[in-house]
Image: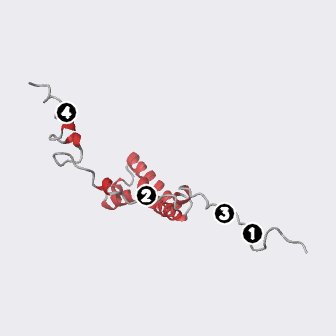
Amino acid sequence: MERDSEPENSKVEAVVPAPHIRLRDYLWHPRIAKIWWSGSLAWWAGFALAQQTGWLLDFYETATSGYLNILFYPMTTAAVLGVPFVWAKLDRGDWVLITPTHEQMFPPRSVGGMRDPAADPLDPRSGLHWQWFHHRK
């Protein structure tokens, strides 16, 4: 009877790292993202056409158009579509939210009670406020 060097149940499984999370998977690949980016392109192309030719210019000057400008603004689109990316990064553990220390939240104040001693006229560390007082006699 031969004896195996390893028991049957002690198989070592390789740890496979989670796939890398890419921003483009959240900003472009979902169907809603493609629809939103295409709508944004159509909106701004129409706006440029309206500025050049005057066609639909009355519509682009309405209040509804103002709301649609915000909706189809590229930074708004990127910010809204990027929220699930941030959630995925936080859930995966790539980004960690830390609580600031007491010293970071409440920095020590200077002599006059200001947070920045360089801006406090009562603090000798303020430089500009105190540099001429010691030279005048």
Q: Residues within 10 Å of mark 4 (few under 14, many from 20)?
A: few
Residues under numbered marks 1 and 2 in contact, where contact means CB atoms less than 8 Å apart: no
For the residue pair 95 and 85, the one nearer the viewer reads as: 95
Q: Amino acid at mark 4?
A: Leu
Q: Nearer the viewer, residue 76 or 117?
A: 117
> Which amino acid is tagged 3?
Val
Marks 1 and 2 sit apart, C-alpha to C-alpha, by 45 Å
Q: First in sequence: mark 3 or mark 4?
A: 3
Q: Position of residue 130 (x, y in %)?
A: 16, 33
Q: Quote the CA–CA distance across marks 2 and 4.
A: 42 Å
Residue 79: mark = 2
Image quadrant holding the N terminus, namely bottom right
* Label 3: few (<14), some (14–19) or many (≥20) C-alpha neighbours in 10 Å: few
Q: Are marks 1 and 3 in contact (CB under 8 Å)?
A: no
Q: Which mark is nearer the camera, 2 or 4?
A: 4
* Element under disc 3: loop
Image coordinates of residue 33 in percent, x first then y, are: 51, 61
Indicate the secondary structure of the residue bearing disc 2: helix
Nearer to us in this view, 7 or 90 = 7
Name which of mark 2 and mark 4 comes first in the sequence: 2
Mark 1 / mark 2, whichever is N-terminal: 1
Q: Name the residue furthest left.
A: 137
Q: Which residue is mark 4?
A: 128
- Indicate the quadrant where residue 97 lies: bottom left
Label annotation for residue 11: 1
Q: Amino acid at mark 2?
A: Ala
| Label 3–label 4 contact, CB within 8 A | no
**Mark earlier in primary sequence (3, 2):** 3
